Image (cartoon, grey):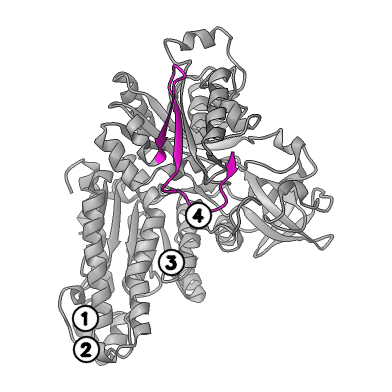
């Protein structure tokens, strides 16, 4: 596949390859994605806005330049912004491929980082020498102001020009809690929302702190995706219930929506409104309980996103899709083209997948019920 | 009005409100009025010192230094609003620029003065609303209601000589509010563009330096009316009645 080099969210020629539950493939213009909807379906998108999570600065003890990429947070609470997990890079910026970036200085607990107006301390080094837990100094308002003024969107060498925040916010972006854009949402705009309603399908959102997609280090990448906090509003739960009642499908816009809904559904008591932290991976052995189809970017085999698609379709279907994507010049990365994959293992066929037994990937770490006023 | 506020305690408590131009005039009066009613308030203003002063006087409010007339500042402002409040139910686009000071006939108005008025009074509210539209729509879907106030003026309707830059920009904002309403009715976001009247504010003093201040409306009175109008709109939305 080709890399999409420019930040055009809704390229007029954007393509979409759709696989139905029988594995039949068809190409449609992505702008016509709503033609795949049926009355009673519900479309669920991730409304997280992308925070400027790349912070350039200095490792105080060594005086060496670093780039800190915020990568994780334990909750979505507005005032819970002192502590983040983060991946640290050495000198340089996104123009260098992440795998070619110099290593940062050796990091130890207690080290100080000066990141523009922000000051942070390394609380601990996590499972990898470049993966840290950091704590910002100051109160939440000062931290938000520092992030807003100094941070830049995380980006990669396939982009020709620096990204602006408006490049990485979807049209429905709300709380700024994603570390990288929930880019499947680029396909949704306000015209699309009107088209969804005109087709008598529903629309709802969840908020999921989409994490970083790549670090350029195989050991670190093997840890992806990191744990991601999410919030499921009562309105989304209700919209899903209505779709279920009328035989409609639950259509997730992006892998993060799949991750949030399936994690929540696997908790005791099933899918309900509230906050949680999605852990583990979804893959070929995961039995999906909620999502009937996913719209996603095009992904290379072996990535965690591709593995997630294997929960929706068999390898034979995905391999035929790969061949089509390559033959038709589909573009990859966050500003590229899309796929739409129906869950081949949904009921009634879902029973076959269930025979493989439950996968222990939905471990619940935190769950707090949320009251919605 | 006190009775209305008492009855609406549940409506206002925890309501997430953002106000631009929040350190003087109507904006400052709104920061105080919303705070009194129990809302969570974020306010935006250009001057960092003014922001700190108003924060000291209203410790529960979140102050944000930023210029809504500058394209590059919109997203940093929006991040701080939704980041600190955790979402947004009400946006008040109150910050305004007069255009040429002293007021001038259009024939004597520098193009740059008109551009500045349009940037503050039309483009800024458009950009900030667009950046916050996802958060507002989420509030509407969750049944909290969502209201955007684009503060207008009688100069948006009446062709007052000398008020060309201001009047044309406010007329455009007023019309844009109507179009937002037509387009977003199904999304449950309501736009209001009230004329708060001639108030005793720094902007009015710039425009009419020799006005008799005793004849002018107090911004606190306008803030009370505006808050009541917002409360009424939210109540209609929450009741599911047509707006």
Q: Residue at left 71%, top 55%? A: A67
Q: Residue at left 33%, top 33%? A: A35
Q: Is residue A133 above or below residue A246?
A: below
Which numbered mark, 1 or 4, is in the foreground of this view? 4
Which image quadrant is residue B112 in? bottom left
> Which residue is labeled 3 in the image?
B44
> Which residue is labeled 1 in the image?
B216
Mark 3 chain: B
Structural distance between the alpha carbons of marks 4 and 2: 49 Å
Which numbered mark, 3 or 1, is in the foreground of this view? 3
> Which residue is labeled 4 in the image?
A167
Mark 2 chain: B
Element carrying mark 1: loop
Tell if the residue under mark 3 belongs to the same chain as the one under mark 2. yes
Tell me whether circle 4 and circle 2 mark residues in contact (CB < 8 Å): no
- The C terminus of chain A appears in which quarter of the rendering? top left
Q: Earlier in the sequence, mark 3 or mark 1?
A: 3
Structural distance between the alpha carbons of marks 3 and 1: 25 Å
Please tell me how crowded label 1 is: few (under 14), some (14-19), or many (20+) other residues with Cα within 10 Å: some
Element carrying mark 2: loop
Tell if the residue under mark 3 belongs to the same chain as the one under mark 1. yes
């Amino acid at each position: 596949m080709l890399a999409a080099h420019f930040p055009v969210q809704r390229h007029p020629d954007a393509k979409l390859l759709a696989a139905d539950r029988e594995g039949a493939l068809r190409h449609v213009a992505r702008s016509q994605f709503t033609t795949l909807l049926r009355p009673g379906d519900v479309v669920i998108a991730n409304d997280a806005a992308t925070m400027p999570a790349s912070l350039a600065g200095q490792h105080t003890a060594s005086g060496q330049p670093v780039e800190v990429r915020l990568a994780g947070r334990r909750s979505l609470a507005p005032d819970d912004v002192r502590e983040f997990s983060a991946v640290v890079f050495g000198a340089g910026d996104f123009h260098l491929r992440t795998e070619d970036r110099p290593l940062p200085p050796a990091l130890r607990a207690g080290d100080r980082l000066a990141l523009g107006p922000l000051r942070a301390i390394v609380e601990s080094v996590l499972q990898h020498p470049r993966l840290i837990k950091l704590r910002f100094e100051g109160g939440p308002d000062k931290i938000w102001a520092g992030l807003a003024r100094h941070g830049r969107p995380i980006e990669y060498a396939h982009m020709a020009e620096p990204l602006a925040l408006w490049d990485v916010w979807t049209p429905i972006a709300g709380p700024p809690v994603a570390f990288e854009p929930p880019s499947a949402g680029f396909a949704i705009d306000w015209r699309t929302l009107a088209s969804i309603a005109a087709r008598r399908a529903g629309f709802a959102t969840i908020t999921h702190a989409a994490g970083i997609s790549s670090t350029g280090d195989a050991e670190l990448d093997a840890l992806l995706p990191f744990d991601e906090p999410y919030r499921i509003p009562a309105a989304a739960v209700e919209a899903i219930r209505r779709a279920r009642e009328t035989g409609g499908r639950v259509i997730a816009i992006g892998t993060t929506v799949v991750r949030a809904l399936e994690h929540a559904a696997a908790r005791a008591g099933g899918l309900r409104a509230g906050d949680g932290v999605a852990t583990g991976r979804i893959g070929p052995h995961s039995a999906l309980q909620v999502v009937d189809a996913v719209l996603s970017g095009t992904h290379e085999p072996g990535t965690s996103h591709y593995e997630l698609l294997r929960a929706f379709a068999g390898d034979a279907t995905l391999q035929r899709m790969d061949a089509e994507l390559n033959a038709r010049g589909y573009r990859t990365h966050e500003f590229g083209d899309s796929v739409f994959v129906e869950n081949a293992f949904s009921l009634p066929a879902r029973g076959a997948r269930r025979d493989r037994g439950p996968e222990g990937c939905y471990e619940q770490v935190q769950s707090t019920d949320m009251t919605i006023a | 009005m006190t009775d209305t506020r008492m009855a609406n305690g549940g409506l206002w408590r925890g309501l997430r409100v953002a106000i631009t131009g929040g350190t003087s005039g109507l904006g400052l009066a709104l920061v105080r009025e919303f705070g009194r009613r129990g809302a969570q308030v974020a306010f935006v203003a250009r001057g960092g010192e003014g922001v700190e002063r108003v924060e000291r006087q209203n410790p529960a409010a979140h102050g944000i230094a930023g210029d809504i007339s500058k394209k590059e500042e919109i997203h940093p402002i929006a991040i701080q609003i939704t980041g600190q409040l955790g979402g947004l139910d009400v946006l008040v686009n109150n910050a305004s620029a007069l255009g040429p000071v002293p007021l001038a006939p259009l024939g004597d108005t520098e193009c740059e003065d008109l551009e500045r008025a349009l940037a503050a009074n039309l483009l800024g509210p458009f950009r900030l609303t667009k950046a916050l539209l996802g958060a507002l729509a989420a509030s509407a879907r969750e049944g909290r209601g969502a209201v955007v106030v684009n503060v207008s003026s009688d100069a948006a309707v009446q062709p007052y000589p000398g008020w060309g830059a201001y009047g044309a920009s406010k007329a455009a904002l007023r019309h844009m509010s109507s179009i937002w309403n037509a387009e977003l009715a199904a999304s449950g976001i309501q736009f209001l563009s009230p004329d708060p009247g001639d108030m005793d504010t720094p902007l009015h003093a710039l425009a009419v330096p020799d006005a008799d201040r005793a004849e002018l409306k107090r911004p606190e009175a306008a803030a009370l009316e505006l808050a009541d109008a917002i409360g009424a709109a939210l109540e209609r939305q929450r009741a599911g009645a047509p707006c």
